[in-house]
Image: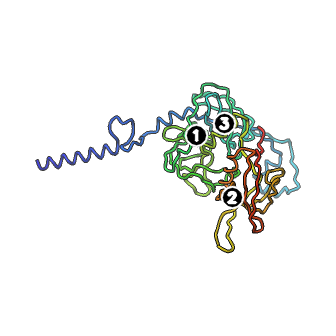
Amino acid sequence: MYFGAWAGAGLAVALLALLLRHGWPGNGGHDGGGNPRSYASAVGAAGPSVVNIYANRIVTESGYSRLEGNPAAQRFLGPSFSPVGPPRQRLEESLGSAVIARADGYLLTNNHVVENKDNIRAVLWDGRTTDARIVATDADTDLAVLKIDAEDLPAVHFAADGALRIGDVVLAIGNPFGLGQSVTMGIVSALGSERLNLGLAGYEYLIQTDAAVNTGNSGGALVNAQGELVGINTAMFGRGRGAEGISFAIPVETAQKVLDDIVRQGFVTRSWLGVELTPLEMRHSVTGEQRLGLQIQAVAAGSPAELAELLPGDILISFRGVALTSLAQFRNAEANLAPGTLAEVEAVRTGLTFIKQVELMQKPHAVP
């Protein structure tokens, strides 16, 4: 009885450990903590909403440009060399992904996937291939809206605003290297990555993940464990820097606004002060207090900044009564206002603080 009692206790402990590790029978594929052992349902929900994009254009090259890859030949021929022979045309191709944002054929993708491309083809989840046209692009956020002639498409479900947290599991769905739809998994590593400098005019509040993203994933979906869209994959950290597991996505809140504006009016509503800015660390000469300022490098002609007599060299320190902490903070605050809004700008010029009331205008946009 003594040994039997210990044996029974040992079996009970072993059974408890198995249940904690693998979950109770019939728990729908979750572990004991309620976390899924498989993300097949999330992929099944979001996968049909991701399409492969193939874009190309005809590029004309002069005879001399064919020697650009041969430095020895260029040195031998010298700078006075004139092209010989007729120009040559070649097909420049790019690939990427897109997300079906609406059932009536509107797609979201990256601007850099379709920029300056003449022919764009979309391959749907069921193998159908169709032409896609650009409705409009927004280079400031690296987003583009495409349209295909199809109905009753499986549109992706958008996650709720602000629902994403650091540590959440995410899945990247796209077309890496043209291999067809593939899925990779990771977690949200950081939110609000403002140091990447993608050239997005300061609109760089990005999602950082460790999900594997490669050439061809651009414009594809980043979804949560429920298969809801949380971002549009846009960039991977430079392989040449030895980076592993660092990729970036545009938040769904930004993508939703760009989509709604473009479908409704053909461009993105974004107010504009009209200045180019560089972050600058400032120190008070008496107290030694440090704070951030944004120094004006250039003022656009005819812009609200010019009308308010702001000058290059002026340092912006607050916008609408809120102290400035980063370039991205200012750009997002500026863009989220309606054109025509009267905004108070506090700045420093030659050591003296002054305040201007500036009426913001719609930021000039490229006509598609």
Mark nearer the viewer, 2 or 3: 2
Residue 82's x, y, as percent?
Answer: 88, 50
Q: Is residue 151 left or right of residue 117?
A: left
Identify the secondary structure beneath mark 1: strand
Q: Nearer the viewer, residue 102 or 47?
A: 102
Q: Which residue is mark 1?
A: 221
User: Three-letter amino acid code at disc 1?
Assistant: Ala
> What residue appears at the point 32 percent right and 36 percent down from the top-left corner?
25
Residue 274's x, y, as percent?
Answer: 77, 52
Picture layout, residue 62 above or below residue 349: above
Mark nearer the viewer, 1 or 2: 2
Residue neighbourhood size for the residue with mark 3, other residues' Cα within 10 Å, grouped as few (<14), some (14–19), many (≥20): some
Q: Which residue is mark 3?
A: 260
**Residue most toward the left?**
1
Q: Earlier in the sequence, mark 1 or mark 2?
A: 1
Identify the secondary structure beneath mark 3: helix
